[in-house]
Amino acid sequence: MRKIIYKIYSFFLITHRALGFAMRRWLVSVNPNVVVSKNVRISKGCTLKATDGGVIEILEGVFLSKNVSLIAQSGRIVLGRNSFVGEYSNIVAKKMIKTGADCLIAERVSIRDQDHNIRCINKPINKSGFNISAVDIGNDVWICAGAVVLKGVVLNDGSVVAANSVVTKSVNKRVIAGGVPAKIIGERYIDRGDF
């Protein structure tokens, strides 16, 4: 009895892995607006959705962890070489969200280049449209767990965003920002081997 169960389990596991690979290939081949380079790892449960002329471009060596959601709603998402996006992170673009190379985006991060227009009171919020402004993330940027990056933000090369921060303004090179709203809380240094 154990041998039969083991054989069924082994068959299911092998079939499941083969189907998972086939589904990833299918996703890329069916949607021409999702461009995936070589050596990209897309984990189980990821959503890559390009609608209304939107484009998602994932460059070489990127790793998408479980349940990552990339949605380009008439906008463009570009993930730079050798970048990592952690579990349950959401990146939603109506204009442009671009990351440089070697970026680390931890779990449960939200990056959006739009928000609802809430100033107009003579229309319901869901019919008032959006305020849209591109997000640009430089090379070697680390966005820690639970952080939120809002429209119009530029995270320059080497910057770090602390966990659970809300970034509403641009962050300079090699600066550590944290808080709600995020402010400068430190700087990165050049390692000269002194430590």
Image (cartoon, rainbow, N blue to C red):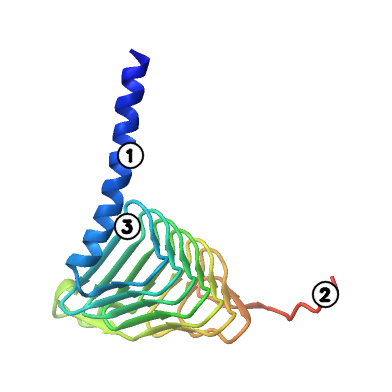
Q: Quadrant of the C terminus?
A: bottom right
Say if 164 sits above or below 150 in the image. Answer: above
Say if 5 sits above or below 153 in the image. Answer: above
Q: Quadrant of the N terminus?
A: top left
Task: Please name the residue that numbered disc 3 is placed on.
Answer: 46
Q: Position of residue 184 (x, y in %)?
A: 61, 80
Q: Is residue 67 left or right of residue 74?
A: right
Q: Residues within 10 Å of mark 1 (few under 14, many from 20)?
A: few
Mark sitting earlier along the chain (1/3): 1
Say if 43 sits above or below 136 in the image. Answer: above
Q: Position of residue 104 (x, y in %)?
A: 52, 68
Q: Residues within 10 Å of mark 3 (few under 14, many from 20)?
A: some
In the image, which disc is placed on residue 193? 2
Q: Quadrant of residue 65?
A: bottom left
Cα gap from disc 1 to disc 2, whole angstroms: 48 Å
Judging from the image, what secondary structure is the residue with disc 2 in? loop
Name the amino acid, label 1: Ile
Q: Position of residue 12 (x, y in %)?
A: 29, 34
In the image, which disc is placed on residue 14? 1
Mark sitting earlier along the chain (3/2): 3
Q: Position of residue 25 (x, y in %)?
A: 26, 60
Say if 127 sits above or below 109 in the image. Answer: below
